[in-house]
Amino acid sequence: MMKWKKWRNHYITFLANLFVFIGFSINAILLREINPIDNSRVALSSEIMIITALIGGLLGIAFIGFDIKFFIKDFFYQKFHYDKKYTRMYIGGISVYLFNIILGMLFVVLSVYFYRQADLTNANSVVTNFTITRNLIYISIGITSAITIVNFVIIRLARLFIEQTLDKRKNNTDENLKPVNSDDKSVIISFDQNNNLVKEQPVGQKDDQKPSGGLSEL
């Protein structure tokens, strides 16, 4: 059970981002197949680029959903034992992840739009629109790749900080530890009838003088 928990904590977020990266990166290969200038190209519809990016995004969202589920399972009932800023940090990472997919899909849809707007009877229009399409696809790959790294780091750090805080609490290794050389022995202070200090000694220290039963006063 512990091995499974450790595995999912480390790799579910990684796989979620990997699917997004692959889904958008495949479009770089598909560009060669839909190139209208290349006569040896395969007859593919430009909408295939939207489908591949969408599949990668949906697979990634599914894995992020698992990560959220396990985050709630692992930390929800301990939310009062760590700083809330780490929860906000985790939510921020999830938000960046979803924004990344939406932004990437926007560039892909725009690239397909410009591709289909080309006038096939005009060579200059075909070349120009395909160049715009290619640039938009490369931009979508670059942006999603960069943001993927950012949100992965944010999510992993949020989990790491929470786990460290809970471990410190469990092992009593908080910053408020007692100094090594501190003296925590309790002291008894006695006063005589005139409120004069008689002696002070730590608890547990035995008095070497044996009781005399009051005979010493005679």
Image: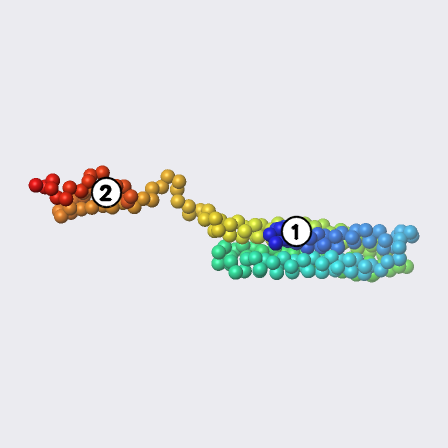
- Which residue is drawn at the image coordinates 54% and 51% (left, top)? 163
Identify residue for label 2: 200
The answer to whether residue 124 of the structure is visible from this angle is: no
Residue 76: x and y, percent? Answer: 54, 60
- Which residue is drawn at the image coordinates 18% and 46% (left, top)? 191
Instruction: Tell me the element at label 2.
Output: strand
The amino acid sitting under disc 2 is Glu
Q: 17 or 147: which is nearer to us?
A: 17
Q: 26 or 15: which is nearer to us?
A: 15
Please tell me the numbered disc located at residue 102.
none
Q: 3 or 161: which is nearer to us?
A: 3
Q: Which quarter of the image is occupied by the C terminus? A: top left
Q: Residues within 10 Å of mark 1 (few under 14, many from 20)?
A: few
Q: 85 or 132: which is nearer to us?
A: 85
Residue 79: x and y, percent? Answer: 51, 58
Instruction: Tell me the element at label 1.
Output: helix
Quadrant of residue 211 within the rendered picture: top left
Left or right? Give the position of 160 relative to 128: left
Q: Which quarter of the image is occupied by the N terminus? A: bottom right
Identify residue for label 1: 11
Comes first in the chain, label 1 or label 2 = 1
Q: Residue furthest right?
A: 39
- Which residue is drawn at the image coordinates 84% and 51% (left, top)? 32
